[in-house]
Image: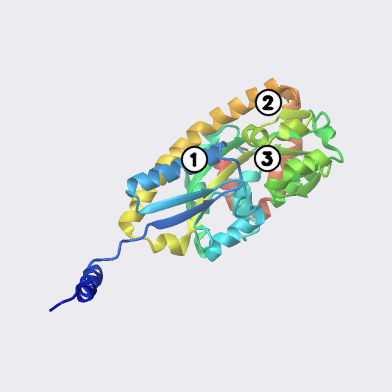
Amino acid sequence: MFNRRSLAALAGAAVLALSGALPALAQPVVIKFSHVVAPDTPKGKAALKFKELAEQYTEGKVVVEVYPNSQLYKDKEELEALQLGAVQMLAPSLAKFGPLGVQQFEIFDLPYLMADYDDLRKITDGEVGQSLLGLLDDKGIKGLAYWDNGFKIMSANTPIQVPDDFLGLKMRIQSSKILEAQMQALMAVPQVLAFSEVYQALQTGVVDGTENPPSNMFTQKMHEVQKHATLSNHGYLGYAVIVNKAFWDGLDPALREQLDRAMDESTVYANSIAKEENDWAMDEMRKHGYTQFHELTEDERAEWLEVLRPVHDEMASRIGADLVAKAHEVLGIE
């Protein structure tokens, strides 16, 4: 005869036996996506769009955790974290690959290389851009896409309308030999600083000015500590969306195909809103009135070109003379 204790034991054994017979519930794949800008910038919005689409297309088999504003890693740390597998996805600015040993990406930093977004697409969507992404494979990184931020403007606490106005100014730049050469051509003093440190450096006078697309300048409140800016559109700031290659290659092919679809659609979204976001940021900064904005005249722009275009030849040996020549050929630069 079974007593209550015996029945309870049998019931427990049955539950254990049944649970052992059932397959364990598969845990979702987690993609930690770290970046250094605000959520309401073009890159920030595109990262959230990728999260939405990736989770939708994989039906929850992938969970994307987005960490904006350097919550996990600053500029100098994030690439190493990706290579070590501490995060799976980043969208660093293209200048970040120079210190990694892929200085060919610094072609995007050449001043006055691309005149507009049509020129830009000829590079990113063409042979030049795709060959550059392929160079990352040997670094344990898989390049997925290019995301725009936009064309940069110069800002400072003194007027900077012509190249001579830069003489002696301490100008913050990303870590890029090309950007160093650009500022030196203007007779400014380049200062490498992490993006997250720029506002305070401008506020306290550690640096006098910087360069940024308007959306970055506005969302980081740099306009509150910069009295002057010039709409030079002298350079481009964009991002390469990258993943840890071992992680990406180890995914189930069907899952990777769904993520590729999410990335393709996120890229179209990212690049479609970039100009709109920068135009909006310019309007907002003008409304706030902290910064006086100057538009270059044709004669002034010719002065900037005369001073900055020689940087192309000066830095061709670093980037690769053939690569620079190919870009010039594609863009019709003589």
Mark nearer the N terminus (2 vs 1): 1
Q: Nearer the viewer, residue 309 or 69?
A: 69
* Tag 1 secondary structure: helix
Residue where numbered disc 3 is placed = 111
Callout 2 crowding tier (Cα within 10 Å): few <14, some 14–19, many ≥20: many
In the rendered image, residue 264, in percent from the top left (x then y), is placed at 41, 43
CA separation, marks 3 and 2?
Answer: 24 Å
For badge 3, the amino acid type reads Pro
* Tag 3 secondary structure: loop
Relative placement, left or right, of 104 versus 11 is right
Relative placement, left or right, of 5 versus 110 is left
Residue where numbered disc 1 is placed = 46
Quadrant in which residue 237 is drawn? top right
Mark nearer the N terminus (3 vs 2): 3
Query: Which of the image's four quarters has the C terminus?
Result: top right
Residue where numbered disc 2 is placed = 285
For badge 1, the amino acid type reads Ala
Q: Please report the residue visible at 45 percent of the width from the left and 40 percent of the height from the top.
A: 49
Relative placement, left or right, of 126 versus 17 is right
For badge 2, the amino acid type reads Met
Callout 3 crowding tier (Cα within 10 Å): few <14, some 14–19, many ≥20: many
Callout 1 crowding tier (Cα within 10 Å): few <14, some 14–19, many ≥20: many
CA separation, marks 3 and 1?
Answer: 26 Å
Question: Depth-wise, is mark 3 or mark 1 nearer the camera?
Answer: 1
* In the rendered image, the vertical position of residue 305 relative to residue 189, given as above or below: above
* Residue 311 visible at all: yes
* Residue 320 visible at all: no
Query: Which of the image's four quarters has the N terminus?
Result: bottom left
